[in-house]
Image (cartoon, rainbow, N blue to C red):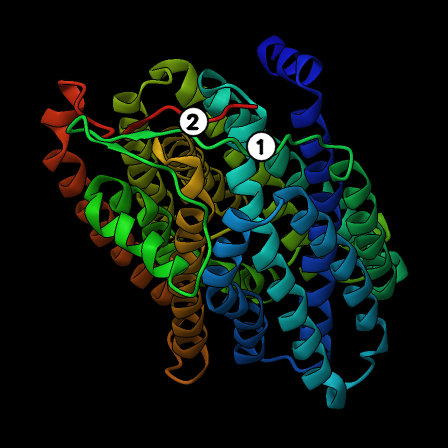
């Protein structure tokens, strides 16, 4: 851990970015627990839960292309601060949702909140490569993953306790405050003006780095991806994973409330055993996503070739964990399988992010991350909707729906391994990334 602590000590810009993430992610998990508890209390419907996650995911898909253009055109710090402040105000509106007739308002506010998140996420993904050195990117992403996981574990547990003892309203207020405090830290980041550097292609051709503007800016970014199949494949890696974990977001809530509610939770003063189980699921998910990238990075290292191996390993472990989830018969095995699955998804996420931040030029980075985010939210929305439909309309048992997700994971893993194999020789010979850039590092 000394390496990660040293990274925080000597890079104040990254430290402020990281502190903002710590605080807002802590509040986010308050929101997740409270929203799930509110939906189940007011509607008791699997489809309603699916609509909740769709309200979270679809705005990210719709607005991400525009957010990517903004992240490449305007000051990324200002975009993140504005997004945090507006989200802090928006989530206070959840306090006015009190009965089933207000559900439409709940969904509307969720759509607004995650539309603002669509502005934040590509900007943050792009700016990370501006606040650390190239050889620190994997460590920074691994620390981000550990932070997300720790906040998942602590925030989910604390959020579950707060929701159980004080109700959903207290959790929503805490989430609002976390956004505002995050904005304070991000506002302290210092990013000098961008300086144009020439782009040197893999063929040795020098291209001038032009300002990002005009109505065809998104098409320019999309054209870049089409011309770089290796980068396009990496940008789609998380989309393959989210096709699996999207439905699991819904299934975990049903597992917690219907199959494995925590027995005797009232002894600990928790009146809702389902909420207690959901908190435990998020705690062990935090353990898996936190430890996975750290362990795999320690074994594989940071080169492009090894990062690709890490993504492949993440897919394989995710598939094993998902298959195990389809056969669990008690709470302890559910938690163990969740650790394995999230160990894989965490590794997949960190290594794919580090690859993109390493090899994508700064002028395209916002649009590439927005494309990646749009793709993963689209597949996550599809997976979520399918999971809810199979549970409610098709009447499929829980284990049956999870088995469908396991088969989906097998297919996506095989597709990724085929992609990895097709680039094995260029990776071994050092020909990937296909574009090497001399660009500003802050």
Which residue is drawn at the image coordinates 86% and 52% (left, top)? 269
Residue 387 in sight in this render:
yes
Q: Quadrant of the C terminus?
A: top right
Q: Which mark is residue 144?
A: 1
Instruction: Give the residue drawn at x 64%, y 62%.
Output: 116
The reply to whether discs 2 and 1 touch (Cβ–Cβ < 8 Å) is no
What element does badge 2 sit on? loop
Q: Position of residue 204 (x, y in %)?
A: 18, 26
Q: Taking 205 as reference, is 81 above or below it?
A: below
Outermost residue to the bottom: 101
Q: Residues within 10 Å of mark 1 (few under 14, many from 20)?
A: some
Q: Using the rendered view, name the quadrant where residue 87 is placed.
A: bottom right
**Vertical position of residue 273 compared to residue 384: above or below:** above
Residue carrying label 2: 439
Q: Is residue 144 above or below residue 234?
A: above
Q: Secondary structure at mark 1?
A: helix
Tell me residue 368's x, y (percent): 39, 48
Side (left or right) of 411 relative to 146? left
Residue at (21% x, 53% y) in the render: 411
Q: Is residue 126 left or right of residue 435?
A: right
**C-alpha distance separating marks 2 and 1:** 23 Å
Q: Nearer the viewer, residue 213 or 159?
A: 213
Horizontal and vertical percent position of residue 436: 29, 26
Nearer mark to the viewer, of 2 and 1: 2
Residue 393 vs 434, above or below: the answer is below
Q: Position of residue 176 (x, y in %)?
A: 82, 56
| Disc 2 crowd, CA 10 A, few/some/many (<14, 14-19, 20+) | some
Q: Is residue 96 left or right of residue 15?
A: right
């Amino acid at each position: 851990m000394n390496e990660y602590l040293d990274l925080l000590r000597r890079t104040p810009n990254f430290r402020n970015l990281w502190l903002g993430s710590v605080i807002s992610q802590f509040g986010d998990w308050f929101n997740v627990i409270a929203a799930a508890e509110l939906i189940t209390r007011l509607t008791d419907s699997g489809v309603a839960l699916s609509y909740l996650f769709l309200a979270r995911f679809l705005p990210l898909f719709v607005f991400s292309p525009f957010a990517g253009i903004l992240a490449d055109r305007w000051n990324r710090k200002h975009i993140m601060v504005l997004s945090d402040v507006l989200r802090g105000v928006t989530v206070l509106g959840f306090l006015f949702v009190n009965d089933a007739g207000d559900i439409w308002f709940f969904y509307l506010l969720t759509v607004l909140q995650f539309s603002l998140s669509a502005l934040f996420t590509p900007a943050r993904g792009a700016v990370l490569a501006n606040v650390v050195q190239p050889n620190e990117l994997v460590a920074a992403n691994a620390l981000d993953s550990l932070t997300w996981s720790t906040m998942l574990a602590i925030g989910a547990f604390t959020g579950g306790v707060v929701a159980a003892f004080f109700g959903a309203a207290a959790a929503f207020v805490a989430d609002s405050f976390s956004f505002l405090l995050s904005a304070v830290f991000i506002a302290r980041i210092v990013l000098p003006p961008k300086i144009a550097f020439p782009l040197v292609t893999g063929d040795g051709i020098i291209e001038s780095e032009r300002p990002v503007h005009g109505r065809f800016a998104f098409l320019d970014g999309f054209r870049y991806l089409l011309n770089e199949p290796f980068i396009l494949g990496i940008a789609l890696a998380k989309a393959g994973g989210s096709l699996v974990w999207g439905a699991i977001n819904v299934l975990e809530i049903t597992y917690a409330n219907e199959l494995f509610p925590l027995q005797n939770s009232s002894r600990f003063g928790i009146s809702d055993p389902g909420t207690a189980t959901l908190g435990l699921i998020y705690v062990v998910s935090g353990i898996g996503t936190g430890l996975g990238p750290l362990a795999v990075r320690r074994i594989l290292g940071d080169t492009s070739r090894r990062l690709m191996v890490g993504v492949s390993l993440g897919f394989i472990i995710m598939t094993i964990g998902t298959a195990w989830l389809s056969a669990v018969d008690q709470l302890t095995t559910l938690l163990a399988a969740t650790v394995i699955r999230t160990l894989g998804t965490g590794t997949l996420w960190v290594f794919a992010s580090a690859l993109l931040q390493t090899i994508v030029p700064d002028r395209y980075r916002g649009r590439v991350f927005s494309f990646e985010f749009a793709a993963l939210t689209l597949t996550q929305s599809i997976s979520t909707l399918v999971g809810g439909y199979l549970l409610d309309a098709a009447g499929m048992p829980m284990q049956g729906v999870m088995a469908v997700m396991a088969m989906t994971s097998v297919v996506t893993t095989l597709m990724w391994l085929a992609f990895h194999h097709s680039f094995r020789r260029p990776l071994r010979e050092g020909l990937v990334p296909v574009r090497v850039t001399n660009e500003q590092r802050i």
